[in-house]
Image (cartoon, helix red, strand yellow):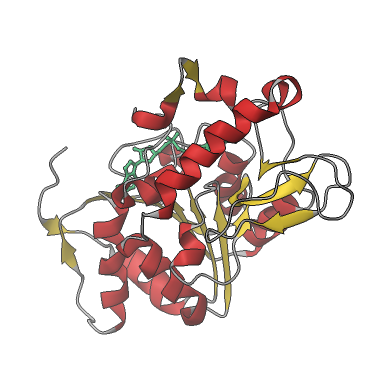
């Protein structure tokens, strides 16, 4: 997709960005696309694993029937991720935790790249590829890339599974509630790199919108959430987000390679 060079960030967004104290960011697979992580709905190598679509191999049912196959798939994904690095979008978002006095980062991604970029507190709605959880006692453990992951729970000895939310499973206790409370309380909400198709995550921008926040979407394509957004920054997150940090030092409207629409 081509993006025209034109004034990209509206005065309204600029004012909100410079003056807001309470900011919420929701990210999806698109924020990691420029790091080389395939998105779910944009095609890519990991959408199918040994003939099984990702929603089948990543399902609660397969965990019950064939845990080793699930591990094989998640170990494969972790191996791919191990060598990937955060991109300018992750880095930019990481700086926002010190810019805004109440900043909440919510991600649907399980790749850990926000943490790798330096984001300290991340609400991981769909869990993390870098954690395991005991199937019996629910104890959680980090996976250290330097050693083989554990097969059994060090506390009770039962098998461990990836600590990710699979199709047919519910979100980690409290995670969505915490994100929803921040959405209801924020002044500015960014929706970055998500197709907006998977709920309840996709409901967060709507909560923010209904509560009166200014909602800005960053995505090369329109999504079902675009209609409720106050501003669309149509472009790649790694190119668009760094434009925002320049707003602090430049009082003029920023120019960049993105198309905008304001309401
Ligand atoms: P999707 O793969 O559904 O959507 C990715 C979005 O990122 C699309 O809207 C793309 O247009 C956009 N995009 C692509 N490249 C981009 C870039 N460089 N910058 C910004 N945006 C870009 O991914 P999600 O919305 O995250 O859940 O998917 C939501 C959930 O569906 C996932 O967390 C996963 C999946 O089922 C579970 O596994 C539980």
Question: In the displayed structure, does residue 254 sit left or right of residue 102?
Answer: left
Q: Residue at x 58, y 20 (%)?
A: 56
Image coordinates of residue 244 in percent, x first then y, are 31, 69
Question: In the displayed structure, does residue 246 sit left or right of residue 186?
Answer: left
In this view, which residue lies farthest toward the front?
A: 148
The image quadrant where one finds the N terminus is: top left
In this view, which residue lies farthest toward the bottom?
A: 249
Res 198 visible: no
- As rendered, which of 239 and 249 lies closer to the eye? 239
Image coordinates of residue 25 in percent, x first then y, are 50, 59
Determine whether 4 is above or below 8 in the image.
above
Question: In the displayed structure, does residue 188 sit left or right of residue 10?
Answer: right
Q: Residue at x 62, y 56 (%)?
A: 143
Res 37 visible: yes
Of the four image quadrants, the one with ligand 1 is top left
Q: Residue at x 35, y 61 (%)?
A: 89
Image coordinates of residue 142 in percent, x first then y, are 66, 59
Q: Residue at x 47, y 72 (%)?
A: 118
Question: In the displayed structure, does residue 40 sit left or right of residue 105?
Answer: left
- As rendered, which of 110 and 233 lies closer to the eye? 110
Image coordinates of residue 137 in percent, x first then y, are 89, 47
Determine whether 55 is above or below 36 in the image.
above
In this view, which residue lies farthest toward the top?
A: 51
Q: How many marks?
A: 0
- As rendered, which of 197 and 49 lies closer to the eye? 49
Determine whether 25 is above or below 176 in the image.
below
In this view, which residue lies farthest toward the left?
A: 5
């Amino acid at each position: 997709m081509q993006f025209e060079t034109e004034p990209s960030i509206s005065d309204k967004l600029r004012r909100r960005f410079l003056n807001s104290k309470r900011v919420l960011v929701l990210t999806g697979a698109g924020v990691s696309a420029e790091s080389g992580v395939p998105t779910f709905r944009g095609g890519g190598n990991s959408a199918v694993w040994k003939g099984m679509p990702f929603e089948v191999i990543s399902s609660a049912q397969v965990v019950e029937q064939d845990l080793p196959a699930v591990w094989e798939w998640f170990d494969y994904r972790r191996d791919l991720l191990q060598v990937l690095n955060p991109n300018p979008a992750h880095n930019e978002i990481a700086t926002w935790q010190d810019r805004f006095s109440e900043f909440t980062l919510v991600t649907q991604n399980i790749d850990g790249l926000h943490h790798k970029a330096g984001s300290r507190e991340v609400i991981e709605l769909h869990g993390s590829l870098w954690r395991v959880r005991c199937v019996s006692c629910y104890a959680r453990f980090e996976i250290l890339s330097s050693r083989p992951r554990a097969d059994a729970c060090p506390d009770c000895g039962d098998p461990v599974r990836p600590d990710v939310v699979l199709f047919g499973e519910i979100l980690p206790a409290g995670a969505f509630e915490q994100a929803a409370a921040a959405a209801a309380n924020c002044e500015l909400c960014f929706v970055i790199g998500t197709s907006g198709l998977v709920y309840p995550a996709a409901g967060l921008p709507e909560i923010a919108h209904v509560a009166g926040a200014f909602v800005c979407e960053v995505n090369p394509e329109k999504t079902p959430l675009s209609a409720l957004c106050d501003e669309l920054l149509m472009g790649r997150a790694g190119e668009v987000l760094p434009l925002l940090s320049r707003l602090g030092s430049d009082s003029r409207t920023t120019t960049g390679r993105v198309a905008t629409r304001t309401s």
